[in-house]
Amino acid sequence: MNIQEAESHLFSGYDYSFERFYQAIRRSHRYGRTGRLKVYIPVSEPERPVWDILKSKLETFKKDVYELQKRFFE
């Protein structure tokens, strides 16, 4: 079974590694996915601090990508 072609992903038991989380999602696109990918991330109360840090890492990543695109495409 190749779950990388699935249209939905459910994550649980994640840690502070934004890179590992990001790569797991991007892997589906590398293997030919053309439609939207649904990602479900249940967050329990004990996991809230981990999730908050992952969200802040995502915002930093978005800002970095934006800055790089400005530099390359100006």
Image (cartoon, rainbow, N blue to C red):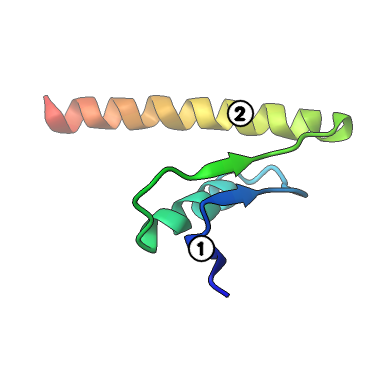
| Distance Cα–Cα, label 2 vs label 1 | 23 Å
Quarter of the picture containing the N terminus is bottom right
Q: Secondary structure at mark 1?
A: helix
| Residue in front for this viewpoint, 64 or 25 | 25
Q: Secondary structure at mark 2?
A: helix
Q: How many marks?
A: 2
The 10 Å Cα crowd at callout 1, few under 14, some 14 to 19, many 20 or more, is: some
Residue at (35%, 61%) from the top-left corner?
32
Kindly indicate the quadrant of the structure image that contains residue 69: top left
- Using residue 66 as the reference point, say whether residue 61 is left or right of it: right
Q: Is 47 rendered above or below residue 32?
A: above
- Give the label on residue 25, or none: none
- Using residue 43 as the reference point, say whether residue 7 is left or right of it: left
- Give the label on residue 55, or none: 2
Residue at (27%, 32%) from the top-left corner?
68
Q: Which residue is mark 1?
A: 4
Q: Where does residue 3 sit, x and y in percent of width and height? A: 56, 65
The amino acid beneath tag 1 is Gln
Q: Where does residue 71 sit, x and y in percent of width and height? A: 19, 28
